[in-house]
Amino acid sequence: MRFFTQRKRFADLTGQEVLALAISSEEDDARIYRGYAERLRSDYPASAAMFDGMAAEEDGHRAQLIALHETRFGPAIPLIRREHVAGFYARRPVWLMENLSLERIRAEARAMERDAERFYAAAAARTQDAATRKLLGDLAAAEAGHQARAGELENAHLDEGTRANEDAAAHRQFVLTWVQPGLAGLMDGSVSTLAPIFATAFATQDTWTTFLVGVAASVGAGISMGFTEAASDDGALSGRGSPIKRGLASGIMTTLGGLGHALPYLIPEFWTATTLALLIVFVELWAIAWIQNRYMQTPFWRATMQVVLGGALVLGAGALIGSG
């Protein structure tokens, strides 16, 4: 296998190289935890304090590993990192943390410790060298200790009330950045395209023409809504989050909302296509009412009256105009 890759197999590492790999891994993990802390500090200070503590724990273990290396092999530590070893567990690129939710960051931290413990334990079970086996077992035990200490830090910095407050803030940010723009787009795409699609359908009774009009209306509305959402608010003052994320959510959901009742007109038979399109409209409008009730705390029957009644009026207007 070495003929196809320049990475070294874990089984081929010497005891010194395994220790050097552990040292660099601890250093990387400490940096990741500090990155998480900086990412969360302004909005979630308690979680940031927890990750600061976890980074300090990683620094302490790294110092212990360096001392062990100096005792066994001297002060010169070989340069070996995760990416140099075939099959070694990977870490998520640091820039991707910008897209992680608060709960996902917490879960990533727990997974980091579990991955390291499992890898060292499995490697210790495979090796035949007694000294290396003991070293790997010690590393697995150290990672298990990390998990226990991480739990202690979480309990110290995140009591039930603090966690509930941070989770509520994270949920609110998710709603403002993704749900609200997406819901507005879905409503616009589902409702505003009803009139042109069904007017064309009843005026021409040509399914292909109706399909083309529906696609054009859906894509055009999606582009318009996406740009409008992104350009209307940069999120700095409103706290609604990235304009690019909001624009994508609004634009994509607008397009999908319109395409839902345009795609049935790929069916050549007019009344079959129209019946299916009407059924999809019914599902779309009730789905919007459910989303409003679930995420926006709008009373269900109020959301139903707003969305279903409004959609029915637009649909009726389109059908009436097309029939005339």
Image: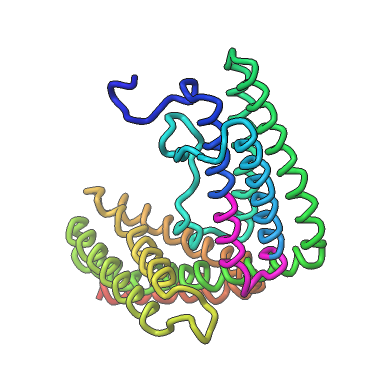
In the depicted structure, whether residue 186 falls above or below residue 260: below
Is 53 on the left-hand or right-hand side of 175?
right
Residue situated in front as seen by the camera: 204 or 299: 299
Q: How is the image coloured?
A: rainbow
What range is drawn magenta here?
A: 29-48
Identify which residue, 10 or 214, lies in the foreground.
10
In x, y percent, where is residue 305? 57, 74
> Does the magenta segment cover residue 41?
yes
Q: Residue at x 81, y 67 (%)?
A: 161
Q: Quadrant of residue 250?
A: bottom left
92 up-or-down from 209: above or below: above
- The reply to whether residue 237 is in sight is yes
Q: Establish if 274 lies above or below 125.
A: below
Left or right of 20: which side holds 124?
right
Q: Position of residue 252 (x, y in %)?
A: 37, 64
Identify the image quadrant of the N terminus: top left
The residue lying at 65 percent from left, 36 percent from top is 68
Would residue 319 be seen by someone viewing this image from the given angle? no
Quadrant of the image for the C terminus?
A: bottom left
Relative to 186, is 291 on the left or the right? right
65 shown above or below 189: above
Which residue is located at x 66 percent, y 33 percent? 139
Magenta-colored stretch includes residue 105: no
Residue 34, x across and y down, in percent: 59, 60
Q: Nearer the viewer, residue 193 or 92?
A: 92
Q: How many marks?
A: 0
Which percent across, then down, holds residue 24? Answer: 53, 44
